[in-house]
Image: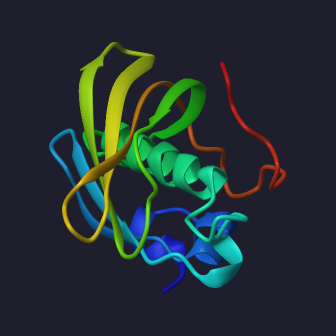
Amino acid sequence: MPTPKLFGVEIPFVDHLGFELVRMEGGGSELTYLPKHEHMNSFLVTHGGAIMTLMDVTMATAARSVETETGVVTIEMKTTFMQPCTGLLTGRGRLMHRTKTMAFTEATIYDAQGRACAHSTGTFKYVKRQAPTAPANTISTD
């Protein structure tokens, strides 16, 4: 399903990976992701870059869940990989604190057996969405 129907905006990379939005409300989010063979590393477990993207989107979605018309950009992210992430993955995110311009979040990725396999904290900046007439690659950071 194209991301505009899920997240309110188009995110081509999320479309490519196949993330599905389950919940986005009240400072929380939940996404699911079934990695494909091309998303694996040389050990045939989900590549860390795909896991970090899932956590980034999960945290951004939690940050946006309290004000869905506002965009966010990632300022920083710290990630811990605890065990291989295999099978159907579920990302659960939480907005821990926010100011007018910043969101402080966390996300945990769980495998199909419900085991935590990765955790991240992140800081996001709230940004205004550009008008439809603005160039497509413009990000407002004012």
The image position of residue 78, as x and y in percent, is 51, 24
Relative vertical location of residue 51 with respect to residue 99 in this rendering, above or below: below
Residue 127, above or below 3: above
Position above or below: 119 against 131: above
Q: Is residue 92 above or below residue 3?
A: above
Q: Is residue 83 left or right of residue 56?
A: left
> Where residue 8 sits: x, y (%)?
45, 63
Residue 96 located left or right of residue 129: left
Answer with left or right where residue 19 lies relative to residue 25.
right
Name the spot of residue 71 as percent of width and height, x first: 51, 41
Q: Is residue 69 visible?
A: no
- Circle count: 0
> Which percent across, then down, holds residue 32?
35, 69
**Residue drawn at point x = 24 percent, y = 37 percent:** 94
Horizontal side of 70 relative to 9 (left or right) equals left
Q: Residue at point 73% right, 37% down? A: 139
Residue at the extreme left: 26
Q: Residue furthest top?
A: 99
Q: Residue at x 48, y 86 (%)?
A: 1
Q: Is residue 1 visible?
A: yes
Query: Image point 31% across, 63% down: which residue?
Result: 111
